Image (spheres, coloured by chain):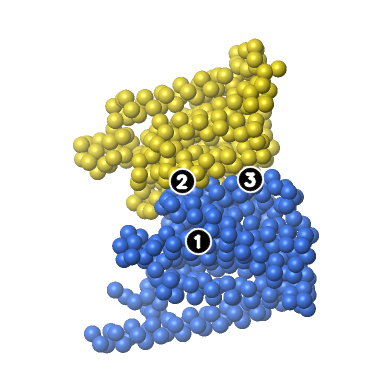
Chain colours: A yellow, B blue
């Protein structure tokens, strides 16, 4: 048997893969958080709850009206995105002129309501979500066994992340968004509807969370609390990456996911806390975050 | 001109008199309460009121939103429970150990958190307290999901039997009063004035030559220690320490108590804690989801009611008439 640092290579690569998959979700979630924060200056505490909503909406669509995974991949983010738009339009918008902490507190209350509501109706136990037929099974890569769905998640999340990055960096809409981040008043004076951009951004951010949720549904079980501890890990990732940069959020997400996976191989007890330890170290060495500008 | 100053002066005095009278009524009420209401419930209220006041010392008077105060509250509960149960130390020493432990944790978490401001500060405290949560989940001394159960209350100073509900109640009340007095004393000291100046304008405080980081860290440690006092007390009251007290939901709850009662007021957090604990007590008998209600109150407070109960009163016309606030 091949060994790496005294660890069987299968175990090593297996955890590396799990880390990569977690990292895919971390990247998608921290990307959404970074986009929302960039423009709205709101830390979206409800991000984990919206991730859970994505998975749940997918699950309910399947069990109620038989909408399959592929369609749900499109429909669930749209539905959750619309709820996000409604929330932004009628509540979150009122908080922009206040201390940014109120946005955090508001979305915290929102997370409690959403998670508490789902738990009240569906209980705290998880519901299984079947892997779509085409993606079930796995391939033997010779040195390890790769479930196809997991491979799909890694590829799809990379596409989503790069796609979002291109949308923001290379399109006209993205240019408006970036300009509005820098100076909303000036952009508005050019006749661009900045409040609408803000609404759209929150919708987009929540839709990204929901997309991550529905992608996670076949891997983890669909449960009301699936996002509640995750969101804090993602917060730590965003602190490490620095909130200013979209690419920073993506790269840090994958990086820390992999690092967490590797910690499971070498020192399993610390795998839950390794991301927080990294955060503490980064704060000591580079308080603005790895990719952040000083604010 | 002079007339106005005189009348506002007399008003100010009458407001002080009203406050003193309220304080006296409150104290008498707290002395009679255990004979009318269920003592364990009252002690729970007092513990959380102290916890919220400790938290408010940081948020209300220093302007720092910590999203990780559950680590100090729940952590101290574990320390006290462990010391009393496993080492057999007397209750007062157990609580003291809890306070010292919480202060030490405050020193560590505060050291990292004060490197950033505002929203980052909140997220860092949240992340570090979550790290402590995972530590508690896995380490042996907390007994994982079961928690430390059957913690003996013991004898205070060797002769007051705390297993008697009334003895315990008056002990809790005493600690509560001392704790609230400590908060009041800190807020109204020169040190407290500097904290407030940091809240109002941090850069100016720096330019005036104050070592802002040091003041922030001291406030953080004091707040953590007082939260630990509340946590250790709670462990003795309920005779257990569990993971619930170190979760981020608990950190959120104490924010809500303070926000609802009134950030930056002495009575606000006490009122807010009383309200929330009573509500939770009531809701737990109805089977209605507590988290949903808590979340809704949170949203309402943030959207419409940011000054909280005491803050709204202070800003009202009635308060101006009674002299709680000078008209400008």
Tag 1: Cα neighbours inside 10 Å, few (<14), some, or many (≥20)?
many
Q: Residue at x 65, y 63 (%)?
A: B98
Asked whether residue B277 is in view, the answer is no
| Count of residue discs | 3
Q: Is there CB contact under 8 Å for labels 3 and 2? A: no
Question: Is disc 3 surrounded by few (<14), some (14 to 19) or many (20+) residues within 10 Å?
Answer: many
**Location of mark 2 (residue):** A283
Residue B306 place in picture, x, y as percent: 43, 59
Residue B128 picture location, percent across and down: 55, 49
Tell me the CA gap for discs 1 and 3.
22 Å
Q: Earlier in the sequence, mark 1 or mark 3?
A: 3
Q: Residue at x 33, y 36 (%)?
A: A197
On-image quarter of the N terminus of chain B: bottom left
Relative horizontal placement of residue B298, taking residue B282 as reference (left or right): left
Residue at left 63%, top 40%? A270
User: Mark 2 belongs to which subunit?
Assistant: A
- Real-space Cα distance between discs 3 and 2? 20 Å
Mark 2 neighbour density, 10 Å: few (under 14) some (14–19) many (20 or more): many
| B122 in relation to A252, above or below | below
Judging from the image, mark 1 belongs to the subunit labelled B
Residue at mark 1: B220
Read off the residue under disc 3: B134
Q: Quadrant of residue B148?
A: bottom right
B23 on left or right of B191: right
Q: Residue at x 66, y 21 (%)?
A: A3
What is the C-alpha distance between the residues marked 1 and 2?
18 Å
């Amino acid at each position: 048997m091949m060994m790496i640092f005294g660890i069987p290579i299968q175990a090593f690569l297996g955890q590396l893969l799990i880390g990569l998959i977690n990292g895919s979700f971390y990247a998608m979630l921290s990307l959404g958080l970074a986009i929302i924060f960039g423009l709205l200056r709101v830390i979206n505490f409800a991000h984990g709850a919206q991730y859970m909503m994505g998975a749940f909406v997918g699950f309910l669509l399947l069990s109620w009206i038989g909408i399959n995974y592929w369609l749900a991949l499109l429909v669930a983010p749209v539905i959750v995105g619309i709820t996000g738009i409604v929330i932004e339009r009628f509540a979150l918008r009122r908080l922009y002129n206040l201390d940014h902490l109120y946005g955090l507190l508001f979305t915290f209350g929102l997370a409690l309501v959403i998670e508490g509501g789902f738990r009240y109706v569906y209980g705290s136990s998880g519901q299984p979500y079947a892997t779509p037929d085409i993606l079930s099974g796995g391939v033997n890569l010779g040195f390890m066994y790769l479930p196809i769905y997991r491979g799909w998640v890694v590829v799809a999340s990379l596409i989503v992340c790069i796609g979002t990055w291109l949308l923001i960096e290379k399109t006209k809409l993205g240019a408006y968004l970036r300009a509005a981040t820098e100076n909303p008043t000036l952009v508005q004076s050019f006749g661009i509807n900045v409040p609408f951009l803000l609404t759209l951004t929150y919708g987009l951010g929540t839709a990204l969370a929901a997309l991550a949720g529905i992608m996670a549904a076949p891997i983890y079980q669909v449960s009301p609390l699936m996002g509640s501890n995750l969101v804090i890990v993602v917060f730590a990732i965003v602190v490490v990456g620095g909130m200013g940069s979209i690419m920073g959020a993506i790269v840090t997400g994958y990086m820390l996911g992999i690092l967490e996976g590797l910690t499971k191989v070498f020192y399993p007890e610390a795998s839950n806390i390794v991301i927080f330890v990294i955060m503490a170290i980064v704060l000591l060495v580079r308080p603005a975050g790895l990719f952040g500008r000083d604010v | 001109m002079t007339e106005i100053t005189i009348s506002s002066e007399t008003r100010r005095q009458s407001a002080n008199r009203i406050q003193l009278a309220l304080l006296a009524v409150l104290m008498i009420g707290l002395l009679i309460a255990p004979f009318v209401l269920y003592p364990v419930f009252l002690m729970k209220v007092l513990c959380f009121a102290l916890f919220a006041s400790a938290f408010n010392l940081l948020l209300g008077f220093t302007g720092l939103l910590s999203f990780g105060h559950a680590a100090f509250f729940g952590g101290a509960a574990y320390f006290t429970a462990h010391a009393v149960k496993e080492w057999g130390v007397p209750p007062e020493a157990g609580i003291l150990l809890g306070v010292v432990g919480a202060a030490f944790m405050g020193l560590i978490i505060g050291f990292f958190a004060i490197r950033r401001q505002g929203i980052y500060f909140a997220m860092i405290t949240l992340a570090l307290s979550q790290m402590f949560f995972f530590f508690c989940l896995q380490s042996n001394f907390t007994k994982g999901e079961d928690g430390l159960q059957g913690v003996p209350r013991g004898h205070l100073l060797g002769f007051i039997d705390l297993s008697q509900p009334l003895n315990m109640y008056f002990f809790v009340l005493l600690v509560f009063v001392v704790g609230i007095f400590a908060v009041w004393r800190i807020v109204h000291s020169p040190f407290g004035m500097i904290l407030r100046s940091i809240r109002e304008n941090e850069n100016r405080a720096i330019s005036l030559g104050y070592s802002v980081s040091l003041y922030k860290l001291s406030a953080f440690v004091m707040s953590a220690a007082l939260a630990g006092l509340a946590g250790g007390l709670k462990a003795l009251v309920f005779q257990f320490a569990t993971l619930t007290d170190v979760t981020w939901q608990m950190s959120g709850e104490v924010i809500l108590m303070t926000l609802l009662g009134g950030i930056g007021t002495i009575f606000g957090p006490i009122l807010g804690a009383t309200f929330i604990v009573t509500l939770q007590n009531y809701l737990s008998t109805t089977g209605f989801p507590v988290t949903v209600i808590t979340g809704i109150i949170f949203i309402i407070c943030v959207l419409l009611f940011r000054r909280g109960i005491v803050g709204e009163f202070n800003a009202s016309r009635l308060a101006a008439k009674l002299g709680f606030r000078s008209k400008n």
